[in-house]
Image (spheres, rainbow, N blue to C red):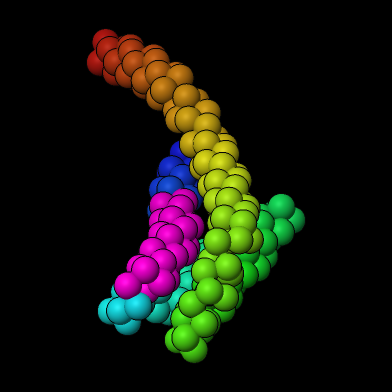
């Protein structure tokens, strides 16, 4: 029963891990796509280039909510801290991009250029990448721990099955002897 329980827990943890990592990558992808759209708009002043920016902006909140839900109450203090950090950095990145887009929409190209070319956006994105990578590492370690626990439990099954088989063979032999004795008596 323990083996089945451990394997079930490992399967659930693997599915959760995949969802968390996918959501983390969605946040990164949303920020990168939004930045691409913002810069495309800056270069061309064609509003069509804002589509990835707007899509990323719409995607970020539901994705952050999904990560919080997936990690849930079992989150360690560090995971909670990282989720909050990712949330703050993602919002800061989108706020920085929104400022650039707003300046462009108001015809303030030089101000938009200065805002876009500061290191603020790059530094925010680098810190966001590091926080996402650290949370992914924690998720990898958690999954590895569940897998190792399931493997340890599985390693006990084979010796137990072997002992059961030996016991059954001894019981069958003893039963056969008793039947033989009873037949002779």
Locate residue 164, reporting x and y percent. Answer: 42, 23
Compared with 4, 86 (above or below) is below
Residue extending farthest to the right is: 77
Identified at 37% across, 68% down, the residue is 43
Compared with 55, 105 (above or below) is below
Compared with 46, 24 (above or below) is above
Specify the principal SS of the magenta part: helix
Tell whether 129 sits left or right of 159.
right
State the image quarter where residue 79 is shown.
bottom right
Taking the image as drawn, is residue 160 in sight?
A: no
139 vs 99, nearest the viewer = 99
Residue extending farthest to the bottom is: 106
165 vs 26, nearest the viewer = 26
Residue 179 lies within the magenta run:
no
Compared with 128, 100 (above or below) is below
Locate residue 77, reporting x and y percent. Answer: 74, 56
Taking the image as drawn, is residue 141 in sight?
A: yes
Give the magenta part as a residue range: 16-44
Tell whether 92 sits left or right of 43.
right
Identified at 41% across, 72% down, the residue is 42
158 vs 74, nearest the viewer = 74
Locate residue 44, reporting x and y percent. Answer: 32, 72
Classify the position of the C terminus by image quarter. top left
Identified at 43% across, 48% down, the residue is 14
Identified at 36% across, 20% down, the residue is 165
């Amino acid at each position: 029963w323990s083996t089945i329980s451990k394997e079930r827990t490992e399967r659930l943890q693997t599915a959760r891990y995949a969802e968390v990592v996918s959501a983390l990558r969605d946040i990164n992808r949303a920020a990168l796509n939004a930045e691409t759209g913002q810069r495309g708009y800056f270069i061309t002043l064609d509003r069509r280039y804002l589509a990835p920016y707007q899509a990323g902006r719409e995607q970020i909140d539901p994705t952050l909510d999904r990560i919080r839900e997936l990690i849930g109450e079992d989150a360690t203090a560090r995971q909670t801290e990282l989720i909050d950090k990712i949330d703050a950095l993602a919002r800061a990145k989108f706020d920085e991009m929104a400022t650039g887009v707003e300046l462009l929409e108001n015809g303030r190209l030089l101000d938009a250029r200065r805002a876009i070319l500061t290191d603020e956006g790059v530094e925010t994105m680098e810190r966001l990448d590091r926080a996402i990578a650290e949370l992914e590492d924690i998720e990898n370690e958690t999954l590895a721990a569940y897998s190792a626990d399931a493997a340890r439990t599985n390693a006990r099954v084979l010796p137990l099955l072997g002992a059961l088989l030996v016991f059954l063979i001894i019981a069958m032999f003893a039963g056969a002897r008793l039947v033989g004795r009873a037949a002779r008596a």
